[in-house]
Amino acid sequence: MSPIQKKVCMAGSFGVGKTSLVRRYVESMFDERYHTTVGVKIDKKQVTVDGKAMTMVLWDLAGEDGVAVLRPSHLRGASGVILVADGCRAGTLDNAISLEQRITAEIGSLPFILALNKLDLAAEWEIHAAAVEPLVRSGWTCTRTSAKSGAGVDEMFLTLARKMLGQDQ
Amino acid sequence: MPEELPGNGHASANPFAELRSLLVGPERDELADLRRRLDSPDRVLDDVSRALPEAILRRSGDRKLRLALHPIVAESIRVSVERDPRMLADALHPVIGKAVRKAVASALQGMLLTLNQIVEHSLSLRSISWRLEAWRTGKSFGEVLLLRSLLYRVEQVFLIHRKTGLLLLHRQAAAVAVKDADLVSAMLTAIQDFVRDSFATGEGAELDTVQVGEFSLWIQHGPQAILAGVVRGAAPKELQTVFQDNLWRIGEERAADLEHFAGDAEPFQACAPYLDACLLGQAARAGRRQPVWSWAVAALVLAGIGAWIFLTVRAQRRWDEFASMLRRQPGIVVTSVVDRGGQRVVEGLRDPLATDPATMLAASGLRPDQVAFDWQPYVSSEAQFVDAREFVARRARLENQAFYFGPDRSGVTPEQLNAIGNAASELRALFRQADRAGKDVRAELIGHTDDSGSEQRNTALGQARAEQVLAALAADGVPRERMRARGVAGAEPLRQGSSDPDRAVNRCVTLRILSQP
């Protein structure tokens, strides 16, 4: 039985560590130059959720700097979204919230997860629980990750995988 | 129905009726209204027509409704087309028109490519060898052209879900190194999006082929799926048709699976035969080596042809040399050369004094059985033959001459001097001729005696007679060193017999011309 495949888009502001987040934890064959040329880089993450194998094909979209346009063609057919924000820069969370709205407007409501990255620099964090609290209350799933230590990364993928499987049922 | 409203003048006449109208009056009115509505078909139609669109819209996901509507809609379309086919044609035109245009363009492109190849190959050196191969193998030139010029292999085929870019099925040819097909599939989709977003101008514009070094990527787009093939080498345009057909079949067979694809590629395993059908190729480069023996045979045949050419040329050259020598030969006139079953027959005229052509033939290197002669004798007027004939005649005259002596005499008589003078001038002329011809000619004077007298005496007498004539000739200017005297006595008599006339003839000196070439 071949694994279930899901297209997952990753989006977030420039420099939030999106690429680092996947670099060490996924299978990859394309380098970062694809970001600047094609505007997207494809990676793959294989997970097993409740005994089911899943291949997440990650469309790592070029860093959103607030002006760049999300290509509808990149979003089309996605089953889930990973939004990445930098815990040390409050602005990146606002950007993630606006990204979520734009993605929902473009392709409808999808299972998504917000990763607050750079957990290893917790002391310098600008995004505090108080800022996240309202989002969680409104149904957002938020995780804290560190691309550097790997903390929370696998859990993030697993959580999203589970949400996507739940969507199928 | 009469209306009895509360509070009018008749109320007091029937308190029950009044009470009833007070209690249920509005309901009665509603009932009456409802009854009116139900009884009026127009009103019912109005109501249903108002509710129908909303009802259908609300139940659009309902299979039952779809099933119920299906025959009606199908029949309606049929009737509509029957009545006015133009309407459907107009409606379909934008769709069909585009599809037809694309198909025609693709077919034209294919034809152009084929034409280009034919023109390119019909005049090249390679095409000559292909024509030879066609002749050798009994194939048509077209087949050989395809086989030799279209060396390609479809190494991998990807079936990709168009919307998500997820891989539905991947097949590869044997011994092909494959990178992660999932990633390739998604990246390919992303790149197509990129190209379409960045450069495409029209709605239906798609990326069809990508050329990367010796590889090319052939992409066929269906409404739900994409078929992409990685091709090594130069594939014929017809390959696109193969891709098209197979993608179309997959689309038809798996329409529902494609429509509702949610990440489970399992059902598409069944499409493997269609993808495998696209893994075409010509393994000509590896598989068609000539066996060693065929090269050996070719070498032998070549060597044979070479030897035959060499021998033929050599024989021809020898013949040419011989023929020209023969024509230059004095006393020989070649009138014709006839080829009779591989043997050349030379016909012509030959002076008997001319060199024998048979000895010339032996020296030429040609085999005696290669050439035959058919000569007619003739007299050549060439100087050397005139000379030669004169020499022969003079020699005969000299050798037929004799100088006679009386019995037991050896002195030259005055009567003989005249004949000796003639002989001397003839001899001098003969020697001159011989000198011109480069021949060493000498004269021998032979002294004869009759059979009377002793042997000893006769020997001396014969010798003396010969020497007497020699001296007389020398006195008349014939070089002495070119003459010699020999006494033979009665050993070589001119006449056999002992009568007086016989003896008179035998008492003489004769001449013999000795020549050495």
Image (spheres, rainbow, N blue to C red):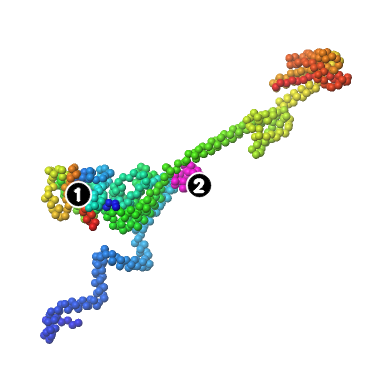
Lateral position of residue A120 relative to residue B75, left or right: left
Question: Quadrant of the rendered structure where residue B17 is?
Answer: bottom left
Circle 2 sits on which residue?
B138
Report the amino acid beneath label 1.
Met
Q: Which is more toward the observer, B114 or B300?
A: B300
Question: Quadrant of the rendered structure where residue B83 is?
Answer: bottom left
Circle 2: is it few (<14), some (14-19), or many (20+) Cα within 10 Å?
A: few
Which chain does tag 1 point to? A
Q: Verify whether residue B134 appears in magenta.
A: yes
- Residue at image location 24% in from the left, 52% down from the top: A51
- Quick check: can you spot residue B201? no
Lateral position of residue A100 relative to residue B297, left or right: left
Report the amino acid beneath label 2.
Gly
Circle 1 sits on which residue?
A156
> Farthest front residue?
A51
Q: Secondary structure at mark 1?
A: helix
Q: Verify whether residue A143 appears in magenta.
A: no
